[in-house]
Structure formats: C-alpha cells, structure tokens
Image (cartoon, helix red, strand yellow):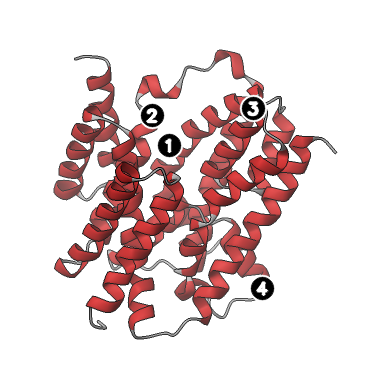
Amino acid sequence: MPLPAEFRQGLRDIAPLALGVALYGLAFGLLAAQAGMDGLQTGIMGATVFTGSAQFVAVERLAAGATALTALVAGIALNLRMVLITASLRDVLAGQPFWKVALGVHLTTDESWALLHATRAAGRPAGYWYLVGAGFGVFAAWIAATVAGASFAHSIPEPRALGIDFAFAAAFIAILRGLWRGRRDAAPWLVAAATVVALRLGTTLEPSWALVAGGVLGAAVAAFGGRDV
Amino acid sequence: MSEVTLLIASLAAATLVIRLGGYYLGAALPQSGPIARGLKALPGTLITALVTLQLINGGVNEWIAGAAALAIAIATRSLPLTMLAGIVTIYALRNGF
C-alpha cells in the first residue's frame, strides 16, 4: 500500500524539529548510560514510552538512586499534560478504528501535535496521516539518537555548549506565530504566560504543574470570555 | 525484574493510558459552547505556557535569543529559520561574541 500523501507531507514538515529531537535524544542517551541502561533497553524505552521529557525525568531519578516507583511517579506527573494534548485531537481521530486511534495517540508528541495545529491554522490540509507522518519522523529520530547516545556515551559533546537546548524554545515560538488567530488570542495567551510566571516565581510548585495550570487557565479565559467562531 | 525493566514497562503502560484517556475525554466533551472554545484555544495557551516556562528557567541570554527568534518568526513565518535564529543567537551570547 503506498503511503498517503499527507504522511509524506507530515514527515517533510517535521524534519527540522526531528533534527532538534535527535540532538535532545543524544543527550538522553548519555543520561541513560549513566543510569546503567544499554542501547537495547534505551531503544525499547524510547519505542514504548516515547515521551522525551518524562523519560528524561524518570531516568534522571533512577540515575540519582531512586526506586522504580519514585521514577515512575515523576514520569507520570510530567506526562499528565499529554491528556490536554490528545484531548485536542478530536477532529483528527474521531471515527477512526481503535488501532488507528492508539497508533495516532502513541505517536503524538509536543512537536508533532503543535506542528499539526500550526499547519491547520495556516489553512493547509492536515489530518490523521499528517499526524502519523510527523509523529513517525519524531519517533525515528528519537529511537536512533537515544540508542546512539547510550551506545557511544563517551564521544559526544554536551548539547548545552552548542546552544541546542534552545532549539525547542525557538521552534515553539515559530509555532505560536502560526497559531496566532488575532486579538481574541491575546487575553488567553497572556493569562497562560502570567500564570506560569506567578506560579514559578511565587510558589515552589513543580514546573510541570505550573505548565498545566497556565494552559488550562488560559483556555478557560477563551471558553468563558469569547464567542463561538 | 530489574528496576530499569520495571520502570520501562510501568511508564510505557501509564503513558499509553494517559494518551488514550485524553483523547476519549476530549471526544466525550460537548462540540460547541464554552468547553469547545476552551479546547480549541488549548494548543495556543499550552504552548505559550511552555515557552514562558523555558524562558523563566533561562536568563537574559535566553530572553534575548527568544526575542530574536520571535522577530524572525513574525517576519518569515518559517520554522527552520526561526530555530536557526534562536540557536545562533544563544550560541553567540553564551560564547561571548
């Protein structure tokens, strides 16, 4: 069966982000090696868990000597925002059989999800196979890079020295530019940003909770302050 | 079973449940009205929160690089160019050019 055109389009569009994922993946591989994981374990974890930030935090806990249970709780806390991400995939996944829903949500990451919404905001077609194509690009980059990082831990430069850690902040700024729908987005986005600033500077709340609170409060402003369009 | 194997298996299962749960939760919610408007606004507010968090965790260098990336994003609407502008700026600032 030939791959749908949207799969290939998603794969092409995700390429610069997949490069960023690969560099981040090398860094994860280094950490996994420090936690005593080999290339095979790292690859299996990447393929089955497939969430960069949660894997990072869970394996960092393990490397710091925590039990598997503590590491699991940390990883779950970081992953809870995925509920919000897959909840906004209704348009793409509705009416699909279960295996396609499961495949779609498993391949969904911050990057492929944000790209999907930015592409749609630009008025270009982006449906199920676009999501899967973009997700597959991230998946392939993540597995290859994390396995390489864990296997060749000794000969890789520290990503922060190269400025690579900033690649995602820049990518999300570009995606925000694409998502901007005009002035009605101003208040929700401002509330989201202000919530994160207040919670991070004013409380000792975990960063991932500040993130979820910011996203939800901003969306609540859009929900109760706006009209249907 | 080793700690690593236990962690991989349990985190993989929990993550799939979270991902599927989010979708079915979103699908069960009403298709119009406040909840639908909120869900529609969620990508923008969540990414705004994410970028804000990344910038707070950084310092002046990150803020300048973020401003440079934003300027390029507004001017070009190009993902690769914006990423390039951000990385080049942060690299230059950190290495004292």
Estimate the spatial distance between the alpha carbons at disc 2 and disc 3, rounded to whole Å.
23 Å
Say the numbered circle drawn on residue A164. Answer: 2
Q: Earlier in the sequence, mark 2 or mark 1?
A: 1
What residue did someone put label 4 on? A98
What kind of residue is marked 4?
Answer: Phe
Q: Earlier in the sequence, mark 2 or mark 4?
A: 4
Residue at the image position 64 percent from the left and 22 percent from the top: A34
Estimate the spatial distance between the alpha carbons at disc 2 and disc 1, rounded to whole Å.
7 Å
Q: Earlier in the sequence, mark 4 or mark 1?
A: 1
What residue did someone put label 1 on? A20
Q: Earlier in the sequence, mark 2 or mark 3?
A: 3
**Mark 3 surroundings: few (<14), some (14-19) or many (≥20) residues within 10 A:** some
User: Going by the image, does B8 lie left or right of A193?
Assistant: right
**In this view of the protein, can residue A124 be seen by the observer?**
no
What residue did someone put label 3 on? A63
**On the image, which quarter does residue B71 sit in?**
top left
Q: Earlier in the sequence, mark 4 or mark 3?
A: 3
**Mark 2 surroundings: few (<14), some (14-19) or many (≥20) residues within 10 A:** many
Q: Check whether the beta carbons of the residues at disc 3 and disc 1 lie within 8 A of each other.
A: no
